[in-house]
Amino acid sequence: MATPMKMKDLFARFLPYYKKYKWIIVFDLLCASLTTVCDLVFPIIVRYITNTAFDNPASLTIILIIKMAALYFALRLLDAAANFYMQNTGHVMGAKMETDMRRDLFGHLQKLSFSFYSNHKIGQIMSRITSDLFDITEFAHHGPEELFIAGLKLILSFAILSSASPSLTLIVFAVIPFVFIFIKFYNKKMRKVFKEQRVQVGEINSQVEDSLLGIRVVKSFANEEIEKKKFEDGNVKYLKLKKKTYFYMGGFGSVNRFFEGIMYLTVVVAGSVFLTKGKITPGDFTAYLLYVSALFASVKTLIQFTEQFQRGMTGIERFCEIMDTPAEITEKEDAVELKHVRGEIEFKNVTFHYSDDNSEVLSGINLKIPEGGSVAVVGPSGGGKTTLCNLIPRFYDVTDGSILLDGRDIRDFTLKSLRSAIGVVQQEVYLFSGTVLENIEYGRPGASRDSIIEAAKAAGAHEFIMQLPNGYDTYVGERGVKLSGGQKQRISIARVFLKNPRVLILDEATSALDNESERIVQASLERLAKGRTVLTIAHRLTTVKNADTIIVLTDEGIMEQGSHKELVETGGIYSKLYSMYDSI
C-alpha cells in the first residue's frame, strides 16, 4: 500500500476547489456565526434573569420577561433563516465541488494510456469516481462550517465564562486538551481503516462487474456457486473491516461520553464549592451548566465530525492518487493540427517495451508504407503485431526511434487530429449501451441521420438494421448483446465509414466470425479500404493475399517482407504458415 499523503498536502490539493465558491463559503460562515451567537445568547438571558431574581426580585417584571422572550424569539427567527442557507446553499456548494472534482477526475482518466487500464480494475476506478467523491461533498460543506462553529463556541464560551469566574473556567477548560489528544490518536486509526474500506468496496465492485458482464460464461459452465463464493469472500472481508471501524467508533464514543461526564462533574463539584464560598452567583452557576452543555455539544460535534473528516480525507487521498498518475501519452506544447492527410507511414528503427516491463516487444523496426498502400502483418502470437499498429495512433509511444506520417513525426501532431485521421476496426467490437444510430454516430458526433444511413449501407449493415424491431433506433443492449458478432462488426465498420479516416487499421477484424459473417464483413472491409492506407493484422492468411506487401513479424523483428506470391515462393516462415492454413 502506498505511503499515506500528509494532511497538509491533501488540504493544499483540495482548497483550490473552494475558489469558485469563496463568496458562498464566506456567507455560509457568516450564517454559522449567527447560529452560534443565537445558541450562546440563551444562557446569558437565563443568567440575567436568575441573577435579577436573586439580587432584586422586584425588578423582574412581566415587561422585562416579555422583552427577553421577544429578543430570544427574534434571534431564533434569524437562526432559522441562517440555518436554511447553510443546509440548502451550503450543501449545493458541496455538490458543485463534487461535480468539479468528478469532471477533473474523469477528464484525467480520459488522458491515461492503455497501460493504466491494463493494471487497474474498472470497479476500483468506479468507486473513486462515485462513492469517494460523495464523501468529499459532505466534507466540503460541513468541514469549514463545523470547525468554524466549534472553534467560535469554544472562544466565546471561554470569554463569557471567564468574565463570571476565571478560576472555574480554567478548571473546566483544562479537561478539553485531553479530549483533543484522544481525537488525534483515533484519527490515525480511523483514516487507515476507512482507506482499507474504500479499497475493498472497489474490489467488490470489480468482482460484481466481472461476474455480471461474464454472466453468459458463468451460466454456460454452471459456475454460479463459484461466483457466489468469490463474492461472499469479498463481502465477508468488507464486513470484517466494518467491524474494525465500529470498534474504533465504539471506543471513540465511549471515551467521549466519559469526558463529557468528567466535565459535568467538574462543573458541579467545583461550581458548588465556589457557590458556597460566594465566589460565584446562582445565575452564573446556572449559566455555567448551560454553557458546559453547549460547550461539550461543540466538542461532541468535533468528535462526530472526525468520522466524516476521515472519510473526506480518504476520498481526497484516493482522488489525488488518480490525478497524480502521469499521462504517458502527452502532446508537445507546439503540437500542430494534422491536415490534408495523404497517408504515407514510415517506421524508422522503432523499438518498444511496456513501461512496467523492460523486455522489448519490438526492436529495430523499419517499414515504409506508401500513400494508399496496403500492408498485412502476420506472424505467431506474441510477435507484437497489434502493438506495432497501436503505436501509429499513439495508444503507446515508441521507446526509441520514430514513426512518421506524411514525412513528419507523429508526436508533432495533436492527439485529436492524429487519431481523427486513423480508423481502427478491432476483433473485439465494443458497442455502447444505446441505439444502433448512436453507436454509428460515434464515428462522427453530430452527423446527420442520412450520413449515418449512408455509412451503414456502405458497411453492408443497412439491410439487417432495417429488420430490427425499431430499425436504427433499436437498443443494442449492454455491449451490443442483442446483436450477433457479424452484426456488431458491421456496425463498427459503419462507424469507421462515417469517420472517413485516411489511414485504416484492421486488427483481426474477421477472426472471431463464422464463414458466412466473415464473407459479408470482408466485403465491407474491402469497400472501406479503397483509397486508404491500410494495415491489416490477420491470422486467416487468405484475407491478406491481395495486400501490396506482407510482413512476417516475430519477437525477433520483421523476418520476411514481400507480396503473397514472393513469400510463398521463398519457402520461409510465411510459406509454412500458409501451407498449414491451406491444409486445414
Image: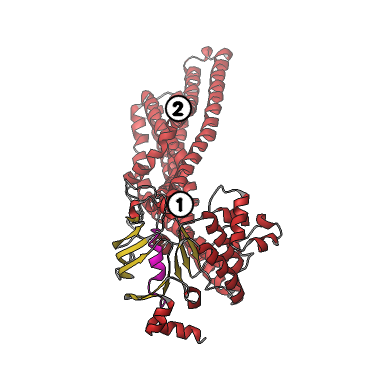
Q: Is residue 384 magenta?
A: yes
> Does 79 appear above or below 447?
above
- What predominant SS class does the magenta segment belong to? loop
Image height of 106 relative to 260, above or below: below
Which of the 4 image quadrants contains residue 498? bottom right
Q: Percent position (x, y) of residue 472?
A: 66, 56
Across and down, in percent, residue 194 comes to: 43, 54
Q: Position of residue 419 (x, y in %)?
A: 43, 55
Q: Residue at horizontal 58%, vertical 62%?
A: 459
Q: Is residue 243 magenta?
A: no
Determine whether the residue tagged by mark 1 lies in a helix, strand or loop: helix
Mark 1 in CB contact with mark 2 (< 8 angstroms): no
Is 565 positioned to the left or the right of 228 in the image? left
Can residue 190 be seen here? The reply is no
Give the image location of residue 544, x and y in percent: 47, 73
**Quadrant assignment for the N terminus:** bottom left
Q: Nearer the viewer, mark 1 or mark 2?
A: 2
Left or right? Give the position of 208 relative to 25. right
Residue 152, numbered label: none
In depth, the one of 223 and 3 nearer the eye is 223
Identify the magenta region.
379-394
Give the residue type that dot 1 points to: Met
Kindly indicate the quadrant of the structure image that contains residue 394.
Answer: bottom left
Q: Disc 1 or 2, which lies upstream in sequence?
A: 2
Circle 1 sits on which residue? 249
